[in-house]
Amino acid sequence: MGTSSNKLAYSGKGRFGYDEFTFSGPIAEVKYFYALDKKFNHDHNYEAHVWVEQPFRLIINEGDLKVEGASLTADLRTEIVTKITESLTKTKMELQDAKKERIGNFPMDLAVPFVTMMYATQWAENVKLSEKYMEMDFSMQHLGLLKKSQTKLLKNIMGEFYKETNEKGEELLAQININDNLFNGFSSAMTTIDKMFSMRDMFKFYPNAQPIL
C-alpha cells in the first residue's frame, strides 16, 4: 500500500552573487509504501497482520537540473539537488507525523479509508489485495474469543460480495459481508459453560447443610 510516481517536478529561484537565477527539473522517482507482514500479538495471543514501512525512495538526478540566469559550479548544482532532496524528505516526515502546520487544511476525510485499512488489518484473519480492492476476513476464533469447545457451531461458509459498482456505475467505497458464523460465535460463547459447579462445594460453607453433605 502506498504511492509512486516519475512524473513530478520541482522549481525555484535563487541568487548567485548579483545574479538572480531560476532552476527546475524532474523528479526521477518517488516511492513511499508499506508492505504487509505478520507479527504475533502477545497481549491477545494471536497472529496479526501489520503494515511495515519500506525505505523511502526519492531520486533527483543532478544532470537533470536546469539553471537559467547564472552559471553555477558543479558543487553549487550538487548543493541545490541535495537541499531539495532534504526538504522533500523532511516534508514527508512532517506529514507522516501529522504536523499541524503541514496538515492544517488537508481534507481529512480522504485519509479515513487509508487509516481504516492500516488499523483494521491488525484484527483480520486474512487479507487479500487486488488492483482496486482490499478484502479482509474477520472471525472470533482468530482473535481467541472462542475456546476449542465453543467452535463446534462454526461452519465453512463461502461469502460473495454483491457487486462492485452502484446503479450509476460508480465504484463502491466499501462492502461488508456478515455470515452466520458471527451469530453462531456469539451464541456459542453465551451458552457454553466451560466450568462444572459442584453443589457439595457450594454448600460446604453453610453449617445448616452439613448433615446432608
Image: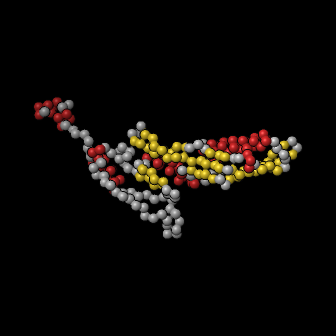
Farthest left residue in view:
211
Residue 7 image position (x, y, % from top left): 67, 55
Q: Is residue 53 left or right of residue 18?
A: left
Which quadrant holds residue 89?
top right
Q: Within the image, what quadrant is residue 183 found in?
A: bottom left
Looking at the image, is 27 positioned above or below residue 166? above
Query: Is residue 30 visible to us here?
Result: yes
Of residue 33 and residue 168, the one placed in the foreground of this image is: 33
Q: Position of residue 90 (x, y in %)?
A: 66, 42
Residue 190 visible: no
Residue at 42 percent across and 61 percent down: it is 161
Name above or below for residue 93 compared with residue 157: above
- Report the residue at 63% width, 53% height from top: 5
Q: What is the total number of numbered labels drawn onto the structure image?
A: 0
Using the image, determine if residue 84 lies above or below residue 209: below
Tell whether 159 sits left or right of 173. Answer: left
Asked whether 20 or 104 is in front, the reply is: 20
Whole-percent x, y for residue 135 in the image:
45, 55
Tell me which residue sits at (84%, 46%) in the image. 71
Foreground: 49 or 210?
Answer: 49
- In which quadrant will I find the C terminus? top left
Q: Residue furthest bottom?
A: 167
Nearest the viewer among 129 and 155 is 129
